[in-house]
Image: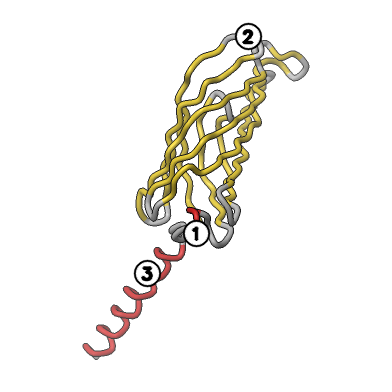
Amino acid sequence: MMTRALTLLAAVACLTAAAWSQVVTPEPGSAGRLRESVFGLGIAAGPASGLGLSFRHHLPSVVSYEINGGIIKVDDRLLYDIGGELQIDLSRGGATRFFVAGAFAYYYAGTANHNEMEAPERVGLGLGGEMYSGQGFHATVELIFTYFSDATVLPLPQFGLHYYF
């Protein structure tokens, strides 16, 4: 009986370790490129690329893209945004990645037929870094020079947390 319990415990431990190792982004091949596509789901928060749920796709190259968006409707107030980001890796290791990012987003806040925002469109360019946080999660921090549609330009931070599978 004790042998059976220990065997079951060892099998669960091995399967758990294997499951965790499957979601870590693979080691880069030549020139820091991934050898296969990697997908991630999570949350992102940034004025240049959107706020809310996020989908990320690392292509088998130095290029990645991200699509972000969120929506809230309470009574007659509507708030939503949609945005995206293109990332090009500058350097990539097993647990870290540094990249150049270009971003765009559209924000809406108002009633169903009137956007009250003065500068709803945003475009940005900047640098970012991503670090493995454990168990398949990766945290991203970026500094993006953001151009607002009212001609304001500000260096603003962006953050993200993604689970890769």
Residue pictured at 47% horizontal, 21% vertical: 156
Q: How far, Cα to Cα, is label 2 from label 1?
A: 41 Å
Q: Is mark 1 on a helix, strand or loop?
A: helix
Point out the tag, 2 or 1, that comes first from the N-terminus: 1
Where does label 2 land, which residue?
Answer: 151
Please indicate, yes or no, whether residue 120 appears anywhere in the rendered image: yes
Front residue of 148 and 63 = 63
Residue pictured at 57% horizontal, 61% vertical: 36
Q: What element carries label 3?
A: helix
Taking 5 as reference, is 91 above or below it? above
Please indicate, yes or no, whether residue 117 appears anywhere in the rendered image: no
Residue 53 in picture, x, y percent from top left: 57, 39
Q: In this view, does 94 lie to the left or right of 65?
A: left
Taking 99 as reference, is 106 above or below it? above
Residue 94 in picture, x, y percent from top left: 39, 55
Q: Quadrant of the N terminus?
A: bottom left
Mark 2 vs 3: CB contact within 8 A: no
Taking 155 as reference, is 39 above or below it? below
Where does label 1 land, which residue?
Answer: 30
Residue pictured at 21% horizontal, 88% vertical: 2
Residue 16 is tagged as: 3
